[in-house]
Image (cartoon, rainbow, N blue to C red):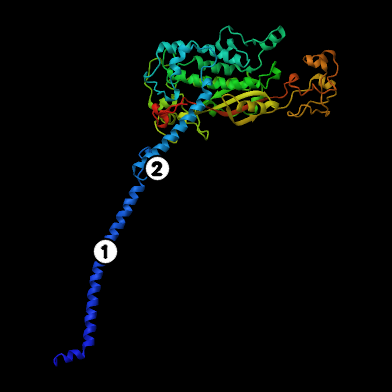
């Protein structure tokens, strides 16, 4: 014990040293253990984060092009597939309704073509037909193509007569007239009524008739057609049908605008200068002030020259029209020869190249361009001479037509009135009218009127030299029956939308899964 007394004397310091050493040891042990825990937990966190990222990056396997992120489990995938299928069913049902509404308007106009002859072509879709002038794959048999061609020359007279215009057969075909210029109404019962219905109501320019007749009869050298006898290819027949559907739709608008006209002076649309469709309509130069001068059968200055020039350009083969031997057409030329090239426009009215259009319409899944398989948007440009007071009525007919023309731009070119007639001067008019929008404005500030004799054509006042005037104001200088001073050139640019035959494959559905309406 005595030996331990010195240690007991310093027990405090010994205890402190022991505690300090123990603390240092525990600290070193804890530091080493905690580092392992931190590293282990850090590894676990990084792994969990990587796993989470891999889950959110998984795409829906029902439609990879949609790029939809989904949780990779069967329930989610099945639910997404059901939602997409329901949307496709709804889209296809709406497409079918729209097509059904227009279906009767998408056939050959008139009753000229034998349905038996046209049946092989009616079963094909122009947008899904593979255009390859180097190949005959998919072509309708040549005898049937030759047979349907014999019907085409009969279409133009039918269309011209439908709007009560004169069919200029000799000028257009170079042969003596065989077809009556205007078909008399079956309702005409007496000579006077028959005489009224037999006269043309609308003057359709010879140049435009020649152009449209050429589209129905001339096929050689166009769209890569190298047939020696000019037999049309299947794709040419399909696009001709589409052109005729659009032309007939425009003529229905003109017919409706002039429905109540008994004589030309009562017609809202008096002259048809040109009807342009597709690429031609989009690229045509806008109507300018020179268009109101006389010229050509349509009354538009230079219209005859312009239309003849465009027709000659269209007839030139990109390979050289004089060649008779069959030549292999390059891939770059095939797109330019494709009748679908720049024919349609998108929602921003930009022309669509043939390659983009063919790719989109042949796709079998939904994409940003799937609408091209559903609807065709075709630009249309009309050049007319109309009664300017009835322009709003004409535009209304465009909007309410069976095949509506969506008007995007209207160009009106006015002009000065001709000198006042002698009868108007006798009534006290001292000067010619100076306002093309108000013919009653004269140098004297008075409005000329006509007497009751004018009801028989305005001849009574001129024959007896009496004044052209009347107190009742019912018949006056503004009446369209007695003057043509309100006729102005009018250009309408717009688009016609028509729907293709529903195709489940175009939206990624199989025909068996399509809904039945």
The residue most toward the bottom is: 2
- How far apart are the alpha carbons under marks 1 and 2? 39 Å
- Disc nearest the viewer among 1 and 2: 1
Q: Which mark is residue 214?
A: none
Task: Name the residue: 58% across, 12% down.
Answer: 171
Q: In terms of secondary structure, where does tag 2 sit?
A: loop
Q: Quadrant of residue 20?
A: bottom left
Q: Is residue 51 left or right of residue 163?
A: left
Residue 495 horizontal/vertical position (percent): 55, 29
> Closer to the camera, 49 or 302?
49
Q: Quadrant of residue 200?
A: top right
Q: Circles 1 and 2: CB distance less than 8 Å?
A: no
> Closer to the camera, 27 or 349?
27
Q: Is residue 335 left or right of residue 290?
A: left
| Crowd rating for badge 1 (residues with CA inside 10 Å; few <14, some 14–19, many 20+) | few
| Crowd rating for badge 2 (residues with CA inside 10 Å; few <14, some 14–19, many 20+) | some
Q: Is residue 419 left or right of residue 186?
A: right
For marks 1 and 2, the one nearer the N-term is: 1
The residue most toward the front is: 1
For the N terminus, the image quarter is bottom left
- Specify whether residue 358 is in view: no
Residue 456 horizontal/vertical position (percent): 78, 14
Q: Is residue 361 above or below residue 40?
A: above
Q: Is residue 403 above or below residue 216?
A: below
Q: In terms of secondary structure, where does tag 1 sit?
A: helix
Label 2 sits on residue: 68
Q: Which mark is residue 37?
A: 1
Residue 58 horizontal/vertical position (percent): 35, 44
> Closer to the camera, 509 or 465?
509
Residue 221 horizontal/vertical position (percent): 45, 18
């Amino acid at each position: 014990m005595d030996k331990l007394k010195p240690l007991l004397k310093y027990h405090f310091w010994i205890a402190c040293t022991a505690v300090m050493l123990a603390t240092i040891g525990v600290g070193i042990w804890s530091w080493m253990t905690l580092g392992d825990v931190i590293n282990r937990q850090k590894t676990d966190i990084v792994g969990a984060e990587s796993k989470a990222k891999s889950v959110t990056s998984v795409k829906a396997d029902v439609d990879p092009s949609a790029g939809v992120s989904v949780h990779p489990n069967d329930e989610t995938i099945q639910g997404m597939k059901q939602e997409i299928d329901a949307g496709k069913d709804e889209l296809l049902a709406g497409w079918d309704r729209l097509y059904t509404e227009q279906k009767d308007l998408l056939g050959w106009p008139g009753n000229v073509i034998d349905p038996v002859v046209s049946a092989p072509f009616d079963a094909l879709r122009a947008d899904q037909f593979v255009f390859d002038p180097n190949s005959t794959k998919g072509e309708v048999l040549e005898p049937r193509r030759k047979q349907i061609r014999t019907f085409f020359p009969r279409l133009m007279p039918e269309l011209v007569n439908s709007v009560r215009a004169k069919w200029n057969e000799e000028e257009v075909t170079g042969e003596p007239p065989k077809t009556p210029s205007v078909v008399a109404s079956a309702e005409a019962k007496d000579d006077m009524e028959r005489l009224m219905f037999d006269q043309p109501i609308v003057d359709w320019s010879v140049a435009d008739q020649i152009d449209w007749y050429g589209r129905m009869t001339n096929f050689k050298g166009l769209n890569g057609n190298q047939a020696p006898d000019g037999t049309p290819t299947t794709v040419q027949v399909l696009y001709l049908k589409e052109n005729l559907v659009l032309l007939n739709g425009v003529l229905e608008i003109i017919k409706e605008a002039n429905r109540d006209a008994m004589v030309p002076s009562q017609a809202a649309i008096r002259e048809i200068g040109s009807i342009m469709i597709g690429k031609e309509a989009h690229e045509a130069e806008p109507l300018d002030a020179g268009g109101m001068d006389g010229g050509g059968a349509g009354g538009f200055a230079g219209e005859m020259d312009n239309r003849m020039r465009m027709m000659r350009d269209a007839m030139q083969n990109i390979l050289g029209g004089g060649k008779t031997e069959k030549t292999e057409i390059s891939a770059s030329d095939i797109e330019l020869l494709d009748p679908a090239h720049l024919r349609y426009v998108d929602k921003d009215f930009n022309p669509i190249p043939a390659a983009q259009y063919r790719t989109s319409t042949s796709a079998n899944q939904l994409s940003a361009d799937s609408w091209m398989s559903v609807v065709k948007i075709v630009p249309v440009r009309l050049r007319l001479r109309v009664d300017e007071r009835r322009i709003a009525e004409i535009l209304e007919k465009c909007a309410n037509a069976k095949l509506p023309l969506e008007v995007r731009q209207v160009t009106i070119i006015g002009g000065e009135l001709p000198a006042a007639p002698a009868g108007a001067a006798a009534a006290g008019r001292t000067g010619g009218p100076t306002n093309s929008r108000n013919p009653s404005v004269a140098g004297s500030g008075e409005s000329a009127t006509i007497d009751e004799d004018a009801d028989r054509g305005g001849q009574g006042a001129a024959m007896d030299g009496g004044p052209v005037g009347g107190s009742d104001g019912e018949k006056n200088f503004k009446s369209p029956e007695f003057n043509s001073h309100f006729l102005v050139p009018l250009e309408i640019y717009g688009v016609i939308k028509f729907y293709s035959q529903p195709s489940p494959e175009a939206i990624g559905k199989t025909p068996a899964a399509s809904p039945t309406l």
